[in-house]
Image: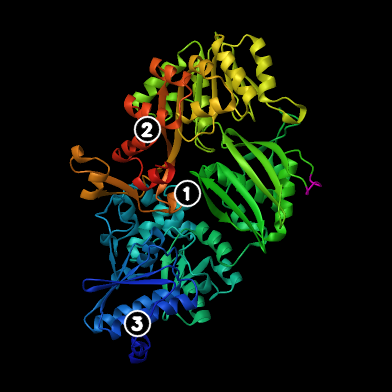
Amino acid sequence: MSQNFDAKTEDRIEGKANHEATYDSLNRTRIGTMTYLAPSHLNTTEEQETVRQAIDECVNQQELQIVIDLAEIGVLRSTILELFLDCQEMLARRGGWLRLTNLNAILREVLRMTGLNHSIGVISVDDVEQTAPPHTASDARNRRMGDLLIDRGLITEARVKEAIGLQGKLGKRMGQILVDRGWVAEQDMLMALAGQLSLPFVRLRSGLFDPDIAGQLPREVARRLKVLPLFKIRDDLFLATSDPQAVATVEEVVERTGCNILLVITKRDEIIKTINDAYGDADFAADFIGDFDEDLELVETAQLEDYTTIDELAAGSPVINLVNSIIQRAIHDGASDIHIEPARGKCRVRFRIDGLLYEVFSPKIELHPALVSRLKVMANLDIAERRMPQDGRIQVHTNGRSVDLRFSSLPGLYGEKVVLRVLDKNQAILDVNKLGMTDENLHIYKNLLDRSYGLILVTGPTGSGKTTSLYAAINYLNSIEKNIVTIEDPVEYQIDIINQNEVRANIGLTFAKMLKHVLRQDPDVVMVGEIRERETAEIAVQAALTGHLVLSTLHTNDSVGAVSRMIDMGVEPYLLSSALIGVVAQRLVRQVCPSCKTTYLASPDMIERYGWQDQGQVRLVKGRGCVECYDSGYRGRMGLHEIVEANGDLQRLIISNPSRDQLTQYMQEAGIKTLYSDGLGRVLEGRTSLEEVHRVVNI
């Protein structure tokens, strides 16, 4: 880091303020000898100037130990990084210091990448132990690349010798030969190179670059050189590159910017993708398309046996290739939904992963109508109809498996928004043993399914995994000896032997009407996708009373709420008490990412609050955030369950048309494990966090 700190800079920071100020975007707190500054935003020049003024006042009042709380800050610009460095150096001259606290994963990565973590201290609020190994090792400096790769177990000595022999013939560096031949992964090679050259290695993504600094190089130059300016602190320009030994590239950047170049190593494809984000949208998103191979086939719904490859259909068309790449990336990343939505001046593509939306791409707004039209063609819909919502279905083959996409369009202010629900049967959980239930809950659930008749209800809000639990139950019951019939809206996963039927409200084929006819088909098990109104509820109860096992869902917050909802719909309590055999309430919580999982000790107050006194020393987990989990700290989801089995006491209570309080009291007296208690158990197991349980389960 170049040192250009002078008296002029110090005067600018110190300031001449002699009064206490109140700022709208910053809280100032004095704790002992330390002063805490907690900004709520640092996006604009005015907000950054507010921090500068607050530090000026602290210095004038001889408050020289300053902690800046960044809990509300998601990203940092170069100007604020430079301000932090100036303040730290000025305070150090006066015997004080500047510290940062509550940094998210992106901010910690920025400090490491720029080296500011060596100049500015970071205060950890938890007793956190990082379980992941560091990116580079200090003993890698000045060692030969081949030796580094061998020591890390990435390659054999024979391969290294073979690569050395090919250097003279191919005129390439040994590392490039190893990557090209697939002997070493590009990321492993770059991490080893970073250690050898004592340079930082990062997985480049949003938040790890300053959009204002990216413009230091023209877009065309950045694309040609495959580099990207990340941050500028004083005269130092941090430059992302996948080839740190390309001297000519560095010299050209120096000539164009006049800055001292500090290299940051990252993968080439990540640089290309980030260039598109940093400079705006790309011409037909050529680089986004190039990230994925052509292993994607569209299954024509008109001819189910005819599979036409996307490559043949595309004939070089950029729009078709872009649509295919978006779908393939969503499947690869495990997204449940794809959102393609227009806005003022831009188009936005977002993926829903583990229940939350992440923006992954921003093509030109001019491309949006073409993207929508292409998806309508794939779904066999009318591309000329843009004023009315449309629904359809797309089936594709990729990576050797079939994936269904449910298409939905909705006209909006700036154009049609399209949502694609990704239904990947290979990723679906169709085994009750893999639903994530505790042994106790799994035993109760299987006992309910083993009954020959009765009504089983699965409850929860939209997106809580109710349908998955029903499909797993149907798969558990599936047998050539049973006639199993489903009524769904729509059919999401197709299962062999099961007779699956889809509701068609446009022709009057509702849940209730179809259920009447299903009961004439000699069914053993009937699955009703959802009970929405009185008629369906009454028929389902009558079916359960006449010797059928009926499975269905309700939108209620907990298990006992299902009883109140059915009675409110008009089902007679005495009929419900005889038909209902069990209720399963569930939620989905995110699991802590295994790639960035860390542990910390629960405080005494926390142990007392949650009743963990008998657990001894309680160690909890949290995710620091990494590229594998979109910096969320979570990856994958698991279920929380609350199962009530209808016994004699509950049946007698239902007959009396109980209130909600009476049902809740029954659960407490019966010792039934609630959603919240199940969640706390998963926290103690180290599978999720307290924050996630509180986010999902309302108490």
Q: Is mark 1 on a helix, strand or loop?
A: loop
Image-quadrant location for residue 591:
top left
- The picture quadrant where one finds residue 90 is bottom left
Q: Position of residue 209 (x, y in %)?
A: 48, 67
Q: Residue at coordinates 68% horizontally, 27% vertically from top-left?
A: 503
Residue hosting label 2:
674
Pointer 2 local density, CA inside 10 Å: few below 14, some 14–19, many at least 20: many
Q: Tell me if mark 3 has few (under 14), some (14-19) or many (20+) residues whose alpha carbon lies within 10 angstroms of its own.
A: few
Asked if one can make out residue 317 in the rendered structure from this viewpoint, the answer is no
Q: Where is residue 81 in the image (x, y as percent from the top left)?
A: 40, 74
Q: Main secondary structure of the magenta part?
A: loop
Inspect this view and state whether residue 656 appears. yes
What amino acid is found at the position of numbered circle 3 in the picture? Glu
Instruction: Using the image as rendered, state which of residue 63 and residue 302 is in the foreground.
Output: 63
Q: Which residue is drawn at 32% across and 26% down?
A: 669
What label sits on residue 339 in the rendered view?
Answer: none
Residue drawn at x 46%, y 70% as measured from the top left: 239
Q: Confirm or deny contact between disc 1 and disc 3 (CB under 8 A).
A: no
Q: Which corner quadrant holds the N terminus?
A: bottom left
Residue 20 tag number: 3
Residue bounds of the magenta highlight: 383-387
Percent coordinates x, y for residue 389 in the rendering: 73, 44
| SS at circle 2 | loop
Q: What residue type is labelled 2?
A: Thr
Q: Is residue 194 one of those drawn in magenta?
A: no
1 or 3: mark nearer the eye = 3
Packing grade of label 1 (10 A; few <14, some 14-19, many >=20) is few
What type is the residue that disc 1 sits on?
Arg
